[in-house]
Amino acid sequence: MVTRQESSLKKTTTQLSYLPRSLKLTWEAAPVWTITWLIMLAVQGLLPAAVVYLTRLLVDNLVVFLDGGPDWANARPVIILAGVMAAALLLTEILKGLNEWVRTVQAESLQDHLSSLIHDQALRLDLAFYESPAYHDLVEQVSNEVMSRPLALLENSGSLLQNGITLAAIALLIIPYGLWLPLVLILSTLPALAVALHYNRRYHHWWKTSTPDRRRVAYYHILLTHSSIAAEVRLFDLGHHFKRLYQTLRLRLRHERISWLRRQGLAGLGAGILAVISAGLVMVWMVWQVAQGLATLGDLVLFYQAFSRGQTTMRLLLTNLGRIHSNGLFLANLFEFLQLQPQIVDPPQVQSSPARLTKAIRFQNVTFCYPGSIRPALHNFNLIIPAGRMVALVGSNGAGKSTLIKLLCRFYDPQQGRIEWDGIDLREISVSGLHRLMTVLFQFPVPYHFTAGSNIALGDVAGAPALSDIKTAARNAGAHDFITNLPYDYDTPLGKWFANGTELSGGEWQRLALARAFIRQAPLVILDEPTSFMDSWAEVDWLARFRQLTQGRTALIITHRFTTAMQADMIHVMDHGQIVESGTHAELLALGGRYAQSWTAQMQAAHQRTEAPQANGHHASAPWV
């Protein structure tokens, strides 16, 4: 029993510790609005006490007025105090409307601030996090649940200090003084009801018409956080570009919402003033009743108390304590996510990034296991990629070819061994500097749902390539012809996420990704299955130009197709994380090993197809078997 109590106390203490951290987040998002909110909270907390004090003064002066007779000298303090009380009630109504507006501005600012924190954290975390189911669970919880939780936690805490009143309590208390009084209260709320209905309809209309933009914001969010494109976003340094697109659209949507909310607040303020005037007139009537002897002084005090907030203090306190607990649970996910630390970081003393590759890239006794795996993807792996040469890696699925790329891009670090760039360990080069040295076509091309031209330009966001450069890259990748046949040429939106988009085939997306890789003039070109989605004719056309495209640069190609591997200066055959054969195409055939066996099997299959009716038009470019 003691253990459970201690555990409960520890949880409560932990959840209460989120309060100052939430205040810090709110302050960072909107310091001016946070100060405004705190001042308003203090004033709203003091107003009930001030009204109670004014009630006492009013009652005391009313007694003097009644004892001294209905003359101006005795009536003047009563009238002044009644006016001050009306002003206090009016101030309460004004602060209520202002508080709603300030709260919304804070919430919008805080949502953008939290989105920025989440995006920055997602971009700095290693690729290993994206391959963990627990990470995706945490991101889902953070993205969907905690955007407004810090502000809600503060609001719940602030509500503990304030009193509330309800229309039902007012009606129950004032019915004995006249059945028409509840009717007056109901009529006094009709303007506010009309304002709410009108602006609810306007909000619904805005919500429907802004759906495409809000979905586009969600798409930018996916680009910044989704695992399928995490590698390419890092390699081409697209994170800040996508984040800028996200923030620009979010800012416009935020301003639109705040604009109509401001108009709603002003209209609601007018309706609130009418309600206060109605209440003031009823109060004057009640004072007159007392003055005429039709009601007692106690009746007057009770009538006023019907408008006080004391009746609901305890209920609000209990309700908000429950909400603080709930919000604290959700905030635990946010703070857990923000505390994750990447393992791939720049060294304390960074080597100056090489401008080019002059000697070779060298893998020396590299061993690597993926997180959570006990089987090495690479084991005592050794490889030399000479500068200015084209090297091909072939092998069956799971041989470790794509793992080699991830290590070379330093998405992971090996557990043993080292990878060198002209003798410099990759871990001594800044991650961003290393990525600028290479351009990569990953195994599964990313279909960015932008225009065709933008898809290519993303390969060199920092360089802001001109249209002529984009077209040159497209021609080099064999993409120019199909792009010019699109409805709007290079300005054609691609994909089906948004209106007027054109979907591409797998081969067309791949050629677009090739163009994106070629537009970056990096000394190292890495292509993972560059022709896997291409048909035979497109492959032949592209291979005819491939040598020219990589002239003067070092190229590493991972492929299952012999027609692609044959273009390389050196072919390495991988199996179970090791290189088992190396040589040119002719040398490997003469060796009679795995490469030659697979080549023979492919040629036999191709020969059988040529003997059959050539309905499919395939030639000898079948993959490695």
Image: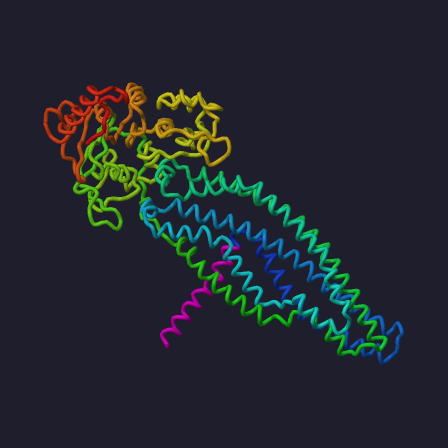
Residue lying at the far left of the rendered structure: 591
In x, y percent, where is residue 460?
Answer: 40, 31
Residue lying at the far bottom of the rendered structure: 67
Residue 514 located left or right of residue 200: left
Residue 535 located left or right of residue 284: left
Q: Nearer the viewer, residue 204 or 55?
A: 204
- 204 magenta-colored: no
Name which quarter of the figure residue 554 lies in: top left
Residue 187 located left or right of residue 487: right
Which residues are drawn in magenta?
A: 1-26
Main secondary-structure element of the magenta-colored stretch: helix
- The image shows residue 11, relative to residue 552, as above or below, that is below
In x, y percent, where is residue 232?
Answer: 36, 37
Name which quarter of the figure residue 612 lies in: top left
Residue drawn at x 45%, y 58% as measured from the top left: 331
Image quarter where the N terminus lies is: bottom left
Residue lying at the far front of the rendered structure: 613
Image quarter where the C terminus lies is: top left
